[in-house]
Amino acid sequence: MQAHQAQQLSQRCRAPVSGLAHRVAPPHSSNRGHARLPAAKVVVGKSAEGALQEGQAKRVFLNQLDALKSMSVVVADTGEPALVKKFRPQDCTTNPSLVLKAVQSPEYSKFLAEALKGGGSVLSTKDRSRPYAGVADALTVNLGAEMLKVVPGRVSTEVDAHLSHDMMASYDKALHLVDLYAKRGVEPKRIYIKLASTWAGIEACRRLQKEGIDCNLTLLFSFAQAAACADAGAALISPFVGRIMDWYKAKEGREFMPHEDPGVLSTKRIYTYYKTHNYKTIVMAASFRNTGEIRELAGIDNITISPQLLAELEANTDPLPRKLDPCMKDDSSLVSMKTQAEFDALHNSDQMAVEKLAEGIKGFTVDQVKLELMLAEVAEKK
């Protein structure tokens, strides 16, 4: 966890955990696909909550985005430096889909040229059928370094999704990305290495964290993934709120109100479990479909939001109440997730998570290939 966040949480949670009791709704009640553990009772320290409300009352917020920034670290979910400048987030994040979208704009052609000129293809991959994989790495790092000129915090940069089930290849690629940033004058403390939350990705994270390289475990859909990431010492996880909701919406053929949204409930459960068992791993909610989901998670550690939804929050001047607090506790038991057998048993019992993880890896892989093909076309024209 970033030092300033850890200090703030420590100060806010010094009060004894007693007083007001609330109940977090259990994960979605359907038994079709989503593995469930018993619901846990959540308790918020009375004096801590009172101090929080008193502190918020003294501030006047311009809009809901401004208010959200007072509760959570807001991260821009975009690969476009211009949009990062517009919304002034603390951190920013990229993935192959975002990079592909960004470089299709003429505004960013110089980053393409720089990557091609750098000859990243020689450092690409053992797969000779993908000679521009290394150029794609260089392009992603070029964009990330540019965004770091704007944000005061960090950029998350993703390891090639093709490597999601190969621990050593993911580890090696992560070191390569760190090296590329170093050549741009960017220190590791300003980077999160993004890895898919497969068992291989989680084990690569375990090794990287021991070497002082902070990781962001992405494509997270199950409680098993969250428990394993915490056990591995991941700096940060990214539960995909909207994609979880998408699965239930398709299965049940109905809409969900924000307070009953399965993705929101899953993320709240993970957040409270982490706080109960004193894990330092930051929970960064991601993949939103609407601002209602965002409002239900106000107060979460970090939250990454698309430019469209950032704009909607900025335009909304209604009050934004805090929904999550680091002093929240529940009566959950610690879940052991130290072996792949334990991980597979719990993760594979969650049909939604199994399907969405595979779908997410496939989607990022497809966009990675599109990006490399585009780089090849540009190179041939030069």
Image: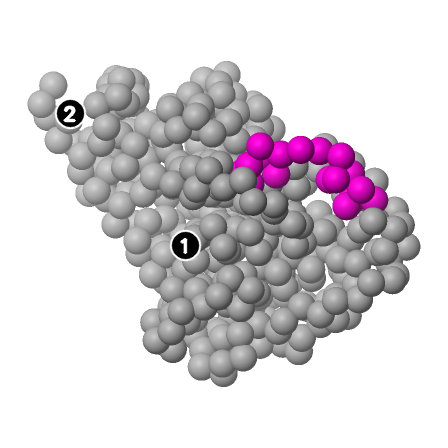
Residue 214 visible to an observer of this rendering:
no
Q: Amino acid at mark 1?
A: Arg
Q: Nearest the camera: 319 or 90?
A: 319
Identified at 10% across, 26% down, the residue is 380
Give the labeled residue for mark 1.
289
- Does the magenta segment cover residue 64? yes
Q: Secondary structure at mark 2?
A: helix
Q: As shown in the figure, which amino acid type bears the numbered disc 2?
A: Ala
Q: Nearer the viewer, residue 347 or 171?
A: 347
Instruction: Please name which of the two marks, 2 or 1, marks the residue nearer to the observer.
Output: 1
The answer to whether residue 371 is above or below residue 230 is above
Query: Spatial distance from mark 2 to mark 1, Cα to Cα?
Result: 36 Å
SS under mark 1: loop
Judging depth in this view, the residue of 134 and 302 nearest the camera is 302
At a point 43% along the width and 74% down the height, the residue shown is 351
Identify the residue at the far left of this view: 381
Magenta residues, start to end: 51-67
Q: Is residue 100 left or right of residue 257?
A: left
The image shows residue 232, relative to residue 78, as above or below, that is below
**99 up-or-down from 251: above or below:** above
In the rendered view, tell whether residue 76 sits above or below residue 229: above
| Whole-percent x, y for residue 225 in the image | 55, 61
Residue located beneath label 2 in the image: 379
